[in-house]
Amino acid sequence: MGKRRRVAEQRKTKPAVIGGLIAVAVVGGAFGAYSLYGGGASAEDRSTTAGRKAVKTGPPTAAEVTALSTRFLTAWQGGQVAKAAGATTDAGAATAALTGYTKDAHISGVTVTAGKPSGASVPFSVKATVTYKGKSRPLAYESKLTVARRAEDGVALVDWKPSVVHPDLQDGDRLVTGAAGTAPITALDRAGGELTTAKYPSLGTVLDGLREKYGKTAGGTAGIELRVVRKAAAKGAQKSPDKTLVTLSEGTPGTVKTTLSATLQADAEQQVAKKTRASVVVMRPSTGEILAVANQSHGFNTALQGSLAPGSTMKVITSSLLIDKKLASADKPHPCPKYVTYGGWKFQNDDKFEIKGGTFKASFARSCNTAFISQAKKLQNDDLTRQAQQVFGLSMNNWAIGVPTFDGSVPVQSAAQMAASLIGQGGVRMNPLNMASVASTVKSGMFHQPYLVSPDVDHRKLATASRTLSAGTLSQLRELMRYTAGYGTAAEAMSGLGPDYGAKTGSAEVDNQKKPNGWFTAWKGDLAAAGVVQQGGHGGDTAGPIVAALLKAGS
């Protein structure tokens, strides 16, 4: 874990009801009248100095928070779009969103129930009706708004974000009711059992992605829905799948068979639930089939789409590079000093340890940062990028697994950032899918692009790597991971799983986090898995038990 620089990443109170067009406020949990002033400012904002209005600074007062939230929510409920938008920091965007709420989403009968403010934040719930071509369904959800002070004039306003209107909305997204763009699907596991979010809560984003990809070709017919239509993706990126919020009339689902294992998926769900912000992927090295995908948090699919510094798990790729270039050999002496300086940065090992007279295998097993940084001066800036792309199939944005993914990023860097990349910091970004694939490549001897739906279903072309590791490099790389699983930082988690196994731990520092993200990637037999626990600490203690439990369950 590099210490020189860090990487920048990635109510139970009784509510106050805003009914009709009556503005009310919550003060100490009780109802009270509140007078509203132009622009949402309170009487305190009307003081002047030498005939000029004073510009207030600092966070908004409790009175301002109550006033602005009341003004916005009351106007929104009453259909007064211009007035509601005028109480926000971006009247244009708010006008478009609130107009679309009625015109495109066909939502009416809005009733807003405001909760007790917490600082500048005000939670609220919404009940409404979605109506389209004679069909109606209720809509209910919770959201929140935040009041902020505008810097130029000190006026307090609702800080506009699309999520104010609905928590699933992000910039560029829209709410639309009508004939669904794609037919629903019934997703099946590898044995033919149905996959649902009721059984497997982590699969919500996966099922949305499968519908987006296969809904038009799986044989179903579209229904009528209120859905979040996601913004178009940037060039070369994969669009996030749309999300259904309310179904007004059912379509006829088509069938999509996946590679997921029902038993391993259930086990993965249970394992990630034990840790906050944990994610894991299990796959089969010999084929690339994905057997389980799970995230403790269900709002974003970190396992497949996360973009996080992988820390020392990246040393698997770096080791293959150093061995290829004859800069390291498993059983030969290799330096592991307390400190190494490169590009103006001073790098150190965890707890400033050093290994005197040790081998490269010892440095790998103990995750010695300086053993890798010390070789930076002998490398070209693009060496690591080329190794990741050509051998491990990463960082080319061309995987086609059946749902959207982030395929890793190993950019060409120079000086200290290039050195930091060697230990999984700098600009390197990965997710559990990427790191499970890395372990799979080592185990199988070649890159097999991971996939969730067989390419035979739609005849899509899977990504390939342009070369494989030499027999000598591959043998040493496997030995490094076996030794780490048996005697190194991964030994406790992998205890009892040998001898056909290998592993690597990692910890990645992130700005503004007290604890690093804990990583673990490993294989056992024809299974490979990788996991991350954000803000968890050392990977062997956090992600390690999750990965090891799944390897044991699947063997």
Image (spheres, rainbow, N blue to C red):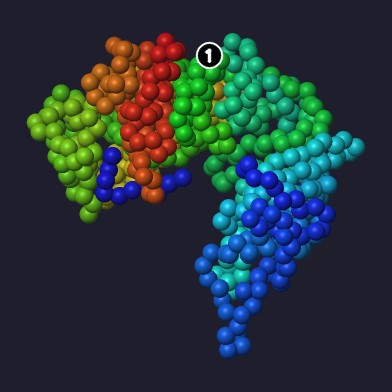
At label 1, the amino acid type is Thr
**Residue positioned 41% across, 32% down in the render:** 532
Residue 282: % across, % down = 46, 21
Q: Quadrant of the C terminus?
A: top left
Q: Is residue 75 above or below residue 431?
A: below
Residue 530 rendering spot, x and y as whole percentages: 41, 26
Q: Is residue 410 left or right of residue 217?
A: left
Asked if 141 appears above or below 317 in the picture, the reply is below
Residue closest to the far right: 134
Q: Quadrant of residue 443?
A: top left
- Left/right placement of residue 538 relative to residue 38 reads left
Residue 531 in view (yes/no): yes
Quadrant where the N terminus is found in the figure = top left
Tell how many labels: 1
Q: Secondary structure at mark 1?
A: helix
Q: Is residue 472 left or right of residue 433?
A: left
Residue 440 in sight = no
Which residue lies under the disc numbered 1?
263
- Around disc 1, counting alpha carbons within 10 Å, would you say few (fewer than 14), some (14 to 19), or many (20 or more)? few
Q: Is residue 212 above or below residue 101?
A: above
At 72% from the left and 36% from the top, the residue drawn is 245
